[in-house]
Image (cartoon, rainbow, N blue to C red):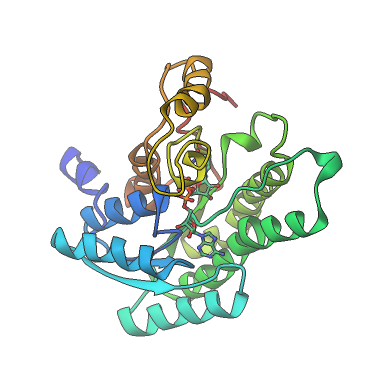
């Protein structure tokens, strides 16, 4: 590959991408990045308003997109979406499993319902996405790229997020296991494990119901994170989207079963 082709390989012009969790935060940034790099992006989220808002932003910027309401914990909905996108748009080249939730609390007190809920969305939801996308991708000539959202929580244990960390560690093992099975069909499966990123998920500690920010609480949450991170920074959604775009593109054509860690250095594995 010469230098011009190498640079071009970071673009994904003409590809069809599905991003779950595209209505907010990291998923939204991924959808915008993939569209900016040339893909038609299906923005999927249980929050239809958020999904449509992201799709509208892509179209406003000159890209091609649509919003879809989907609950990733419902296998049939995920299957239908993958099959329909392939039929209507011709292929599913990129599938990003970004949708997720947080459930907090110590192991000793964790209610079974909380555990079931987070497993259903953060682990089974990713599993269903991998299955649905993998079935389409292994049957199409060009193969495809699947990118899953893990977390630094899978690398560095900390109190009160065990259920979340279990899911994110499971996503890593799913990513590696599936990569061994589908590589022969030119389907790549990789993951990103972000560090602390300011989004609705993390902002709930200091964003009031009316949308205003409790600055004292914000500093109390964010400053220790920042100081604890080797780069003395917290992440922005685009920092994660950059890794996702790379893994989605042909620039990563020799990578599968890998975990990229845009985390400011907070965990080095
Ligand atoms: N923000 C961080 O610091 C951080 C760090 C590491 C990993 N992550 C992971 O990145 C991903 C995105 O997180 P974020 O911070 O952007 O959160 P976010 O809350 O801003 O976005 C999550 C999105 O997922 C959607 N979603 C939730 N349940 C769903 C379901 N059942 N079906 C479909 N969509 C659903 C939500 O509606 C929302 O739009 C998550 O998997 C999260 O665990 C986040």
The image quarter in which residue 94 lies? bottom left
Question: Does residue 223 appear in this view?
Answer: yes
Q: Is residue 160 above or below residue 226?
A: below
Q: Nearer the viewer, residue 61 or 193?
A: 61
Q: Position of residue 84 (x, y in %)?
A: 42, 83
- The residue most toward the front is 210
- Of 177 and 130, the residue lying toward us: 130
- State which quarter of the image contains the C terminus: top right
Could one spot residue 15 in this view of the protein? no
Above or below, 20 against 3 in this view is below
Q: Residue at x 46, y 28 (%)?
A: 218
**Image position of 113 (left or right of 143):** right
The image position of residue 17, as x and y in percent, is 36, 64
Say left or right for 124 vs 66: right
Expressed as whole percent of the image width and height from the top left, the position of residue 171 reads: 63, 50
Quarter of the image where one finds residue 31: bottom left
């Amino acid at each position: 590959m010469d230098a011009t082709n190498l640079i071009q390989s970071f673009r994904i012009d003409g590809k069809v991408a599905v991003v779950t969790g595209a209505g907010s935060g990291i998923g939204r940034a991924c959808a915008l990045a993939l569209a900016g790099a040339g893909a038609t992006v299906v923005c999927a989220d249980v929050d239809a308003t958020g999904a449509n808002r992201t799709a509208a932003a892509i179209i406003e910027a000159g890209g091609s997109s649509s919003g879809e309401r989907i609950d990733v914990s419902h296998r049939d909905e995920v299957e239908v979406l993958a099959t329909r996108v392939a039929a209507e748009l011709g292929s599913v080249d990129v599938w990003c499993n970004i949708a997720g939730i947080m459930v907090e609390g110590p192991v000793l007190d964790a209610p079974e319902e909380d555990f079931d809920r987070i497993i259903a969305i953060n682990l089974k939801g990713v599993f269903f996405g991998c299955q649905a996308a993998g079935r389409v991708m292994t049957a199409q000539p060009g193969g495809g790229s699947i990118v899953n959202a893990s977390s630094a929580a899978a690398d560095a244990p900390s109190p009160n997020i065990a259920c979340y960390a279990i899911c994110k560690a499971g996503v890593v093992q799913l990513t590696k296991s599936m990569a061994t099975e589908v590589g022969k069909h030119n389907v790549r499966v990789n993951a990103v494990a972000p560090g602390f990123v300011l989004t609705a998920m993390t902002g709930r500690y200091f964003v009031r119901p009316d949308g205003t920010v409790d600055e004292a609480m914000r500093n109390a949450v964010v400053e220790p994170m920042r100081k604890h991170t080797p780069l003395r920074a917290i992440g922005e959604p685009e920092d994660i989207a950059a890794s996702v775009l790379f893994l989605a593109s042909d620039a990563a054509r020799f990578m599968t079963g890998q975990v990229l860690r845009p985390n400011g250095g907070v965990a080095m594995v």
